[in-house]
Amino acid sequence: MPKRDPCGCAGVPFLCHMSENEDARWMAIALEQARAAGALGEVPVGAVILRDGEIVATGHNLTHTLNDPTAHAEAVAIRRAAQATGHWRLLGCTLYVTLEPCAMCSGAIVLSRIPRLVYGAADPKAGMCGSLANLVQHPRLNHRVELRTGILADESGTLLREFFRARRERSKYSSD
């Protein structure tokens, strides 16, 4: 039985050598997507899918806009990337997302065979990439994802905290 590549990059050299600065560059674009979601009144989470140093797809939360509970930033970006590449397997891609993926999105990441995931802020209430469990690296699954966490976590977390603080303030005054 052949040995698995220890870094989880499936032997794709570009994925093996991403520096923290390069990851921060792409995460900044995911943060732009998160701000676009916030401008729509959506929870400000953004995602970018990269292959060979080029953006394949972007996405942000659209659950309220589309009345679709599955329209999380990661799922939107994965759907768009599959359309753009013409294939459901997103081999050689890296997914950047501002918030740790939930169970649904973690499952989509595994199923789409994305080899590398970079996220910003941890999600202690719903995160399934290390906070509650680690679905993307579960040993019983047939695909495991290389994981880098905490890239621009402060900026990602601040954006979310400000959004929810503003929402609480609006609801406090609208209930009078």
Image: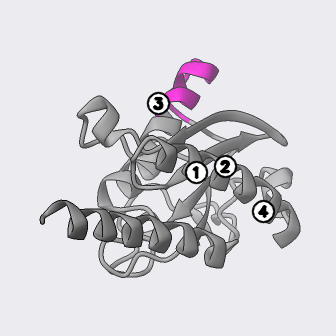
Above or below, 39 relative to 135: above
Amino acid marked by disc 1: Arg
What kind of secondary structure does the magenta stretch mostly adopt?
helix
Magenta-drawn segment: 79-89
Residue drawn at 61 percent across, 21 percent down: 84
Image depth: mark 1 or mark 4 in front? 1
Pick the front one: 128 or 121: 121
Contact between marks 3 and 1 (CB within 8 A): the answer is no
Contact between marks 1 and 4 (CB within 8 A): the answer is no
SS at circle 3? helix
Residue marked by disc 4 = 23
Contact between marks 1 and 2 (CB within 8 A): the answer is yes
Pick the front one: 51 or 12: 51
Residue marked by disc 3 = 79
Q: CA distance from mark 1 to mark 2?
A: 5 Å
Residue drawn at 54 percent across, 74 percent down: 157
Residue 127, position in %: x, y? Answer: 38, 71
Q: Earlier in the sequence, mark 1 or mark 4?
A: 4
SS at circle 4? helix
Q: Which mark is residue 32?
A: 2
Q: CA distance from mark 3 to mark 1?
A: 20 Å
